[in-house]
Amino acid sequence: MTPAALPPDWPFKAQSSLISTGRQRFWVADTGPPAQSGDAPTLLLLHGTGASGHSFRRTIPGLSRTCRTITPDLPGHGCSATGFSGRLGLDAMAADLWTLCDTLQVQPKAIIGHSAGAAIGLRMAELRPVAQVIGINAALGEFDGAAAFLFPILAKGLATLPFAASAITGFFGRPGTVERILTGTGSPLDPEGRAQYLRLVRDPDHVTGALGMMADWRLQGLLNRLPQTRTCVTLIASEGDRAVPAQVSIDAGRRIPGARLHLVPKLGHLAHEETEDGLSALILDVLKPDGSTATPPRT
């Protein structure tokens, strides 16, 4: 997908640009408070597999009143869909996102990641110091049993087959199908949100990138190292998430030293796209030094 293909009302299109990091180009939304407000802390927002930076459309306004927000489309996704061949695994994406930060000359105070974006944020924090990582319905669990072996192989096969992406866009790129998929995550979304995902699913480059990320996704190393995590971690988990159950965050939180857990009732996997403020008030609360709103893990 190219920026020119985005509709005029695409979230933060006017605040976004293509940023070249050498071999690669990221589509990045860069928002923040007025210049006269002084040096604002920088937050890096990372979406999950198959989404794009648009998924923070409700989160960014609340955060950008006091913070600078950097929200890229992940490698292989959205308008960052090309130029990342062979670099869609966890380690490569974490390294390339640090290269993006260097290009922008920013050091994030915190990384806020949704789903797979939370895992990338934790990997980035292993590579360089980051004060906080906040995960929203963090995908911090491997597939179980045979699925752990078969799913990446199937995704890799689909990613390399000619016309596979076009076939997938044709099959899934229907309003009713997208609505059923979103509802299946516990987050039905409003018509605007559904239309945005429909546009992504209909783009073959985006679908190819999402498949490539799934094919190269290996979490076991990161999961094994969770007890050695040194950054401050907060996990926000939706009790109505049907894609990544809240228990995944509960279990991960028990293995991360000092991790804090916030359980959100009723909402689904795309909780930040369901709430009016995109969970920005909760995120800003978590960013406070005292962490006074933290709740202990519970089952």
Image (cartoon, rainbow, N blue to C red):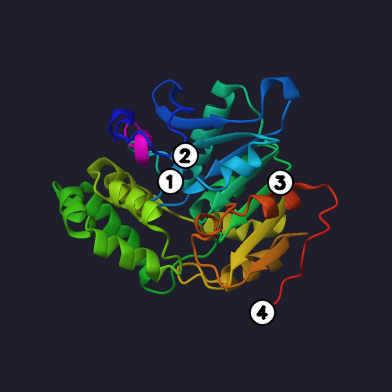
Tell me if mark 1 has few (under 14), some (14-19) or many (20+) residues whose alpha carbon lies within 10 angstroms of its own. some
Q: Is residue 22 above or below residue 63?
A: above
Decide which of 85, 184 is in the foreground and name it. Answer: 184
Percent coordinates x, y for residue 224 in the rendering? 60, 60
Between disc 3 and disc 2, whose residue precedes? 2
Q: Is residue 240 magenta?
A: no
How far apart in space, not on screen, are marks 3 and 2 (Cα)? 21 Å
- Where disc 2 sits, the SS reads helix
Between disc 3 and disc 1, whose residue precedes? 1
Find the magenta span and give its range.
77-83
Q: Which residue is mark 3?
A: 132
Percent coordinates x, y for residue 81 in the rendering? 33, 37
**Numbered tag placed on residue 92 in the rendering:** 2
How far apart in space, not on screen, are marks 4 and 3 (Cα)? 24 Å
Give the label, 4 or 2, closer to the camera.
Answer: 4
Amino acid carrying label 4: it is Thr
- Where disc 3 sits, the SS reads strand
Instruction: Confirm or deny contact between disc 1 and disc 2 (CB under 8 A).
Output: yes
State whether residue 150 appears in this view: no
Amino acid carrying label 1: it is Gly
Give the label, 3 or 2, closer to the camera.
Answer: 3
Identify the image quadrant of residue 35.
top right
State whether residue 266 appears in this view: yes
Q: Which residue is mark 1?
A: 89
Decide which of 63, 243 is in the foreground and name it. Answer: 63
**Numbered tag placed on residue 299 in the rendering:** 4
In the rendered picture of this protein, how many numbered marks are placed on residues? Answer: 4
Which residue is depicted at the point 54% across and 29% down? 30
